[in-house]
Image: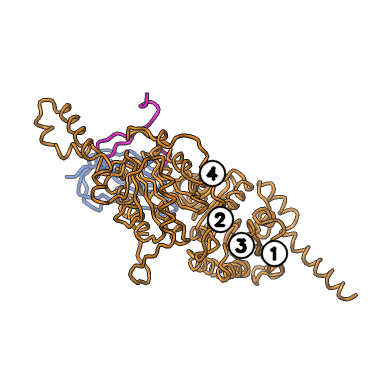
Chain colours: A blue, B orange
Amino acid sequence: MTEKKYETIIVHSAKYYTEYTRKYRNRPIWEEPNMNHIYSFIPGTIIDVHVKVGEKLKEGDSLLILEAMKMHNNVQMPFDGQIVKVFVKPGQRIPKKHLMLEIKPL
Amino acid sequence: MSLKRNILDLRKRKSEVLKGGGEKAIEKQVAMGKLTARERILYILDQGSFHEYDLFVEHAARDFDMENKKLHGDGVIIGTGTVHGSPVCIFAQDFTVAGGSLGLMHARKITKIMDHALKMRVPLIGINDSGGARIQEGVDSLAGYGEIFFRNTLASGVIPQISVILGPCAGGAVYSPALTDFVFVVNNISKMFITGPSVIKTVLGEEISMEELGGAKVHAEITGNAHFYAESELECFEQIKKLMTYIPWNNKQKADKIEPRLPKKKKKIENIVPGDPKMPYDIRDIIQAITDHSEFFEIMEMFAPNIVIGFGRLHGETIGFVANQPKVLAGVLDCDSSDKAARFIRYCNAFDIPIVTLEDLPGYLPGVDQEHAGVIRHGAKILYAYSEATVPKITVIIRKAYGGGYIAMNSRHLRADFVFAWPTAEIAVMGPEGAANIVFRKEIAEAEDPEAMRQIKIEEYKTKFANPYVAAARGYIDEVIEPEDTRKMLLHALQVSANKSVMGPSKKHGIPPF
């Protein structure tokens, strides 16, 4: 019965019955960053995609151009590697933290 | 005859200025559900006590055709009056006059009344309702804000400073309230933010309403920028007046003592707390079972409710209460609750208000979000604040006092003057479950039935350590008391501490982990 009425919090192996706050419920849950996923760091429009699936690239090579606030942002390859998947196409408007490309190191 | 004419002329001039921004602007103000600046002052102050100054001040803008514009009182009203018969200085920005925008003379009126408040050592109440800097006055308006912030800092800890947000308060303007002791907000009326929704949308593409970004509820519940939340302006004014009954005029005086009253007998204090230390209860019921007339004036009720802070009275004297709240998040300490408690402890210390701490917590809140949000430096604030405080400090351990939480919550080691524990208190490095898992790791792992062995070892640890007597044997707590005696013990401890005098090493100031 108590389990239904209350939420629980575990501190040092002991389970306490209590209530949550809205802020606690909405707390960010941490995820290990995946270096092979290229996300948009700002909302904007894809101007051009310079790469195709399977293409091999060197660190610093241009991947795509993301326009945000009238600036053309040149998104570059973070390490030597290969394009696994392309999720965006030119003209597409995307939000922040949108998965644009999947890559893998070589 | 000519004197009469002069008097009539004065009256005419006054009545002109008292119109503020004019009928239309006042209509707009009312349509927004807001009172006018002058009405607000009159509601807060004792009847007939308000005296206004600088009524005839004119703005100093000389560009953009501003020289031909008349801005009555330059958009702010300043003066003195009384609350419950005690003098206060007050200013109120008048949104009906040029949107309450802040220019050179507007700022000078505010700083004049601030200087007055500090010199006379009386509380300052500031009512904020302003569109922000008056762009036409350029750098003069920035200078104005800076002069206000400097005075807020200078007066901090000398006189109580109260900010009432009754309209927009955006950009740099928010930093005056942030520097003051108590911030009051009203639902649907208060708006505070550094960067508004439109800029956030253009720059970051994040769409959010003004209310969700910086409305009253957000500041009362999420950001912790506001200390008191009300549904209406009138409710807000009652809160201000109530607060004024608990705090002194300045740091050299004691808060007014009132006729002592016994708590209202509601429930036996020991029946409030469940026997199982893992079950919750509302710590405020304990506070109300202790305080005079069972009154408790809670501060920051919605923000970090896992710790409870506020004022109550013991034998007529104002006491600051800091209490873990098992009802919310099991009463753990985290970034927000540490900030909340630390600032309150420093307020009490600055204004000579004794602190009573009620303790029942399992420790600090575990989680990546907490660690990455800096729970180390935030948590350190509470240690700093308690250690630094020289007012009488009394702790009552109700149930759990584990690990770092035990040390932080005004332990003997941070120089509590008195530490009492209920017989239900458990003072240990951690709860029996965690401790047994570590201490008896080998026995549990090697047992035929590890789960059964774990339970046996947990029970063993519980019997031996989950009580107040190990700490009592070291003198870390002064006395194990029966719950019903809590008020009696506190009253006596406060009586004994009345002339407390301690002197730390001489220094310019410490470096708290801000």
Are there few (<14), some (14-19), or many (20+) residues within 10 Å of tag 1?
few
Q: CA distance from mark 3 to mark 2?
A: 23 Å
Residue type (three-letter) at the residue carrying disc 4: His
Residue B51: which numbered mark, if any?
1
The lab-note entry on whether marks 4 and 2 share a chain reads: yes
Using the image as rendered, state which of residue B38 and residue B400 is in the foreground. B400
Q: Residue at 66% of width from left, 64% of height from top?
A: B79
Mark 4 touches mark 2? (CB < 8 Å): no
**Is residue A17 shown in magenta?**
yes
Residue type (three-letter) at the residue carrying disc 2: Cys
Q: Counting residues from the N terminus, which is met first, the one under dot 4 or under dot 1?
A: 1
The lab-note entry on whether marks 4 and 1 share a chain reads: yes
| Disc nearest the viewer among 4 and 3 | 4
Residue B169: which numbered mark, if any?
2
Residue type (three-letter) at the residue carrying disc 1: His
Secondary structure under tag 2 reads strand
| Disc nearest the viewer among 3 and 2 | 3
Residue type (three-letter) at the residue carrying disc 3: Val
| Residue B350 image position (x, y, % from top left) | 45, 62
Magenta residues, as a range? A1-26
Secondary structure under tag 4 reads helix
According to the picture, the residue beneath numbered tag 4 turns out to be: B293
The lab-note entry on whether marks 4 and 3 share a chain reads: yes
Q: Counting residues from the N terminus, which is met first, the one under dot 4 or under dot 3?
A: 3
According to the picture, the residue beneath numbered tag 3 turns out to be: B88
Q: Residue at 27% of width from left, 38% of height from top?
A: A85
